Image (cartoon, helix red, strand yellow):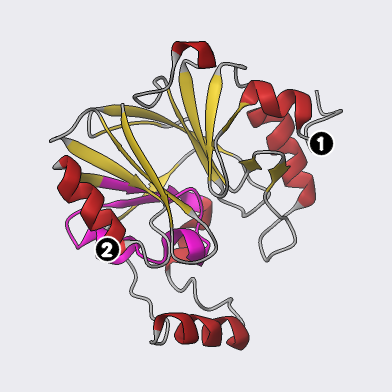
């Protein structure tokens, strides 16, 4: 699976582009703040055409560029419990953060809701751009946080890495950490349940592509992540 990852211009949010091969349709995951130019270069370089945008949750640092990326002809997919966040993800930001945005990018932050939004449900299987994706609802960071499970791995991952599937974990699981639960819609109790019931049952051979920071594996997190200890 052709996989390209790059950070957004703010908050270090990882944007992922997935495709069966060059010259095919692709899936864009979490197009955050200021990704349009880099994403355009990636699409041109690999001759890719977006078929869908998948959003792990509705925080602005993961969805800010979804409308220009979708362009009116590509659907944005988000769990039904976070659908409301696409109405105005800027509404929860304080004035200082909005001012920082204007200082960094030279313009005021603005938002336009995507025209075509598909609501996802737990356990649903999507086939987009020739890639099968299972939706795993994992609330805690937000009410509708979701992870996306794929039964394939990125091209170039060596056999000795011992991985045979991929989990795009959003802000549920990071290398050595987890997403914060103190923002509106977050819940420490829900996060604990998601880690215990959704994350830990994943096979050790799962490559994890998180919403922030480097890739990891379920095997590594099971043994080293302090937030997973004692949850089995």
Q: Secondary structure at mark 1?
A: loop
Q: Residue at x 55, y 63 (%)?
A: 11
Quarter of the image containing the C terminus?
Answer: top right
**Mark 2 Cα shell of 10 Å, populated few (<14), some (14-19), many (≥20):** few
Task: In the rendered view, tell whether residue 146 sits above or below residue 11.
Answer: above
Q: Residue at x 62, y 17 (%)?
A: 204
Q: Is residue 115 visible?
A: no
Q: Residue 37 got which mark?
A: 2
In front of the other: label 2 or label 1? 2
Task: In the rendered view, tell whether residue 159 sits above or below residue 229.
Answer: above
- The answer to whether residue 81 is left or right of residue 51 is right
Counting from the top left corner in percent of width and height, residue 38 is at 30, 58
- Closer to the camera in the image, 73 or 177: 177
- Closer to the camera in the image, 167 or 201: 167
- The answer to whether residue 199 is left or right of residue 38 is right
Quarter where residue 227 is shown: top right
The disc, 2 or 1, on the residue closer to the chain's N-terminal end is 2
**Mark 1 Cα shell of 10 Å, populated few (<14), some (14-19), many (≥20):** few
- Closer to the camera in the image, 61 or 73: 61
Q: Residue at x 45, y 11 (%)?
A: 159
- The answer to whether residue 185 is left or right of residue 153 is right
Span highlighted in magenta in the image: 52-80
Q: Is residue 41 visible?
A: yes
In 3D space, how far apart are the residues under numbered discs 2 and 1 (Cα atoms)?
37 Å
Q: Residue 226 got which mark?
A: 1
């Amino acid at each position: 699976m052709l996989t390209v990852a790059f950070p957004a211009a703010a908050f270090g949010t990882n944007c992922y582009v997935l495709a069966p091969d060059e010259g095919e349709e692709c899936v864009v995951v979490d197009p955050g703040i200021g990704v349009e130019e880099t994403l355009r270069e990636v699409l041109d370089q690999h001759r890719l055409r977006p078929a869908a945008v998948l959003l792990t949750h509705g925080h602005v640092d993961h969805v800010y560029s979804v409308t220009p990326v979708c362009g009116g002809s590509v659907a944005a997919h988000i769990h039904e419990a976070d659908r409301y966040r696409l109405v105005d993800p800027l509404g929860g930001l304080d004035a200082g953060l909005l001012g920082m945005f204007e200082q960094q990018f030279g313009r005021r932050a603005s938002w336009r809701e995507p025209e075509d939004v598909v609501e996802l449900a737990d356990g649903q299987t999507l086939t987009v751009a020739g890639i099968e994706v299972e939706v795993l609802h994992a609330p805690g960071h937000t009410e509708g946080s979701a992870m996306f499970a794929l039964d394939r791995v990125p091209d170039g991952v060596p056999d000795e890495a011992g991985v045979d599937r991929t989990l795009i974990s959003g802000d549920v699981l990071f290398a050595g950490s987890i997403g914060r639960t103190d923002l509106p819609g977050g819940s420490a109790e829900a996060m604990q349940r998601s880690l215990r019931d959704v994350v830990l049952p994943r096979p050790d051979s799962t490559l994890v592509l998180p919403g922030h920071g480097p890739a990891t594996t379920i095997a590594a997190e099971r043994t080293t992540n302090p937030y997973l200890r004692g949850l089995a």
